[in-house]
């Protein structure tokens, strides 16, 4: 079989083939009719990161065409379409008939393409990932991969199906694709500083945007627009942002915490425009070997910011940051490795470069889902520990059936979290209403 055919065969149908539901010959002829090695991409969630992910996909160097777009809102889709069309011209082949608006548009967009970019707020990730894998599509999906524990269980279940169908899945925990992290962590895993016994991971920053309520909006539309401040959409910032640093801890430890405890609150962001989330968390993640990683994540403006990771080990220590830094010291404080950042690839682009190269070559290489789900879960357990004030054990948390997603997705439907008559949303108080969270 010629190389092009083999590649197209893999791109379009690896899932269906592995599931044994199609006959190879009929596939080959339908693939042959296409006569091209073009990889068709659909973008679901056309906001800031979705636009960025599309740019990164085009920077992969493969023969990519964007053929479908889906977004909850017409204006967001139109804006991103305009940006991409201006930049990439004919590579954007998305007529109005393949622009899908609303809650259900993702299904049609997934059917139109070979590779799906999932970049909505994370509450929708389990549902969208499930559909993409059901349809046999390769996936790039942004972190985090869920916002509650039933969502995590769904993602883990779908990950098994993706593996069975040999579908490549890359998740946007881009530190995993960044040279300084890869080089330093390889050395740590090879024993350069001994066993890691403690660590500190940080995402202390000034916070993000607020999207104001408009008089014409239903409650559902308001929450969807101002999604950062609602857990069913965002997961709180300990999940949405800090998952990056938490994942570094789990990656270094090559395991997940057995229990988490912590504290958090709202200090600055107390207004109704900030929904239900906290603005600060501090947690301790305890692993089964007794090691403890401490984490801080906070959104306070105008004070010290810090986003990085540091770990202490039996024979040394390490410092890591997304600014391409990695330094290892031995137990006497002598530097034993300093990463050279010169020429390091952009990790956001590297994710796509590796994913699309594998797809184009007909290789099955990427199954990022499991570690991404477990690191997302670590953040979720951290949130629950702080909201409840309890020590939360990993195994017990995994049994949780508390599903924070709405029953119905439509503009008139009500999310589960609602404001009081003054527009104020209920905020977790440790010790009170613990059963709502776990
Ligand atoms: N890896 C990173 O460093 C990084 C950086 C930024 C954002 N992200 C992640 O990317 C995701 C999106 O973040 P963003 O900053 O682009 O947000 P955004 O608000 O700019 O974009 C989200 C888009 O999704 C759309 N959307 C919401 N629900 C939808 C649905 N059900 N179906 C279709 N479209 C829907 C919104 O209308 C919006 O256009 C989040 O998970 C975020 O954590 C990752």
Image (spheres, grey):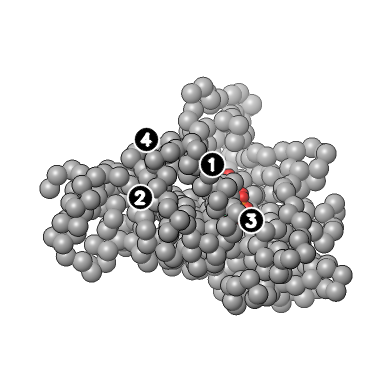
Query: Quick check: is the Cβ at mark 3 less than 8 Å away from ligand 1?
Result: no
Which callout, 4 or 3, points at the residue further toward the start of the chain? 4
Task: Locate residue 303 relative to residue 61 in the image: left or right.
Answer: right
Q: x%, y% of residue 213? A: 76, 60
Q: Residue furthest right?
A: 422
Judge depth for marks 2 and 4 and give the one in front: 2
Q: Return the residue nearer the eye: 26 or 357.
A: 26
Q: Which residue is mark 4?
A: 61
Question: Which label belongs to residue 239?
Answer: 3
- Under circle 3, the secondary element is helix
The reply to whether residue 173 is visible in this rendering is no
* Residue at disc 4, secondary structure: loop
**Pointers 1 and 2 in contact (C-beta within 8 Å):** no
Q: Nearer the viewer, mark 1 or mark 2?
A: 1
Instruction: Give the Cα distance between marks 1 and 2.
Output: 19 Å
What is the spatial separation of the Cα atoms under label 4 and label 3, in whole angstroms? 32 Å
395 or 276: nearer the eye? 276
Q: From the viewer's perspective, tell me whether residue 67 is left or right of residue 22.
A: right
- Classify residue 262 by image quadrant: bottom right
Instruction: Write down the residue under mark 1.
Output: 83
Q: What residue do we see at 72% from left, 38% from top?
A: 306
Query: In the structure shown, which secondary structural element does the residue marked by tag 2 occupy?
Result: strand
For the C terminus, the quadrant is bottom right
Nearer the observer, disc 3 or disc 2?
2
Say if residue 412 shows up in the picture: yes
- Answer few, some or many: residues within 10 Å of disc 2's Cα (few below 14, many 20 plus, some between 14 and 19): many
Residue 113: x percent and y percent? 36, 55
Q: Are marks 4 and 1 in contact (CB under 8 Å)?
A: no
């Amino acid at each position: 079989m010629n190389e092009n055919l083999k590649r197209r065969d893999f791109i379009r149908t690896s899932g269906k083939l592995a599931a044994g539901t199609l006959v190879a010959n009929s596939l080959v002829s339908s693939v042959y009719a296409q006569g091209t090695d073009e990889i068709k991409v659909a973008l679901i969630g056309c906001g800031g990161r979705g636009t960025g992910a599309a740019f990164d996909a085009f920077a992969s160097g493969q023969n990519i065409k964007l053929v479908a777009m889906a977004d909850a809102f017409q204006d967001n889709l139109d804006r991103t379409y305009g940006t991409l069309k201006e930049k990439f011209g004919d590579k954007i082949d998305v007529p109005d008939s393949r622009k899908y608006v609303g809650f259900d548009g993702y299904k049609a967009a997934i059917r139109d393409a070979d590779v799906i970019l999932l970049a909505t707020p994370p509450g929708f990730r389990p549902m969208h990932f499930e559909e993409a894998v059901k349809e046999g599509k390769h996936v790039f999906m942004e972190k985090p991969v869920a916002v509650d524990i039933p969502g995590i269980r769904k993602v883990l279940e779908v990950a098994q199906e993706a593996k069975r169908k040999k579908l490549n899945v890359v998740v946007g925990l881009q530190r995993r694709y960044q040279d300084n992290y890869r080089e330093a962590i390889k050395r740590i895993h090879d024993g350069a500083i001994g066993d890691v016994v403690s660590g500190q991971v940080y995402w202390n920053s000034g916070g993000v945007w607020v999207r104001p309520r408009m008089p014409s909006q239903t409650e559902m539309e308001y929450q969807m627009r101002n999604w950062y401040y609602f857990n069913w959409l965002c997961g709180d910032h300990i999940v949405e942002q800090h998952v990056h640093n938490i994942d570094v801890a789990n990656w270094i430890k090559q395991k997940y915490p057995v229990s988490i405890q912590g504290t958090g609150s709202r200090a600055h962001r107390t207004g109704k425009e900030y929904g239900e989330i906290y603005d600060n968390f501090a947690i301790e993640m305890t692993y089964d070997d007794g090691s403890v990683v401490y984490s801080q994540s906070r959104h306070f403006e105008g004070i010290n910011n810090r986003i990085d990771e540091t770990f202490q080990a039996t024979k040394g220590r390490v410092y890591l940051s997304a600014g391409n830094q990695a330094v290892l010291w031995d137990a006497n404080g002598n530097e034993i490795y300093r990463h050279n950042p010169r020429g390091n690839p952009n990790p956001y682009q590297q994710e796509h470069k590796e994913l699309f190269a594998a797809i184009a070559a007909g290789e099955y290489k990427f199954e990022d889902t499991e570690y991404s789900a477990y690191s997302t879960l670590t953040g979720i357990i951290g949130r629950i520990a702080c909201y409840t004030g309890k020590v939360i054990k990993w195994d017990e948390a995994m049994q949780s059936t508390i599903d924070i997603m709405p029953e119905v997705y439509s503009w008139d439907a009500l999310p589960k979290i609602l404001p009081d008559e003054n527009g104020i949303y209920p905020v977790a108080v440790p010790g009170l209403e613990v059963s709502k969270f776990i």
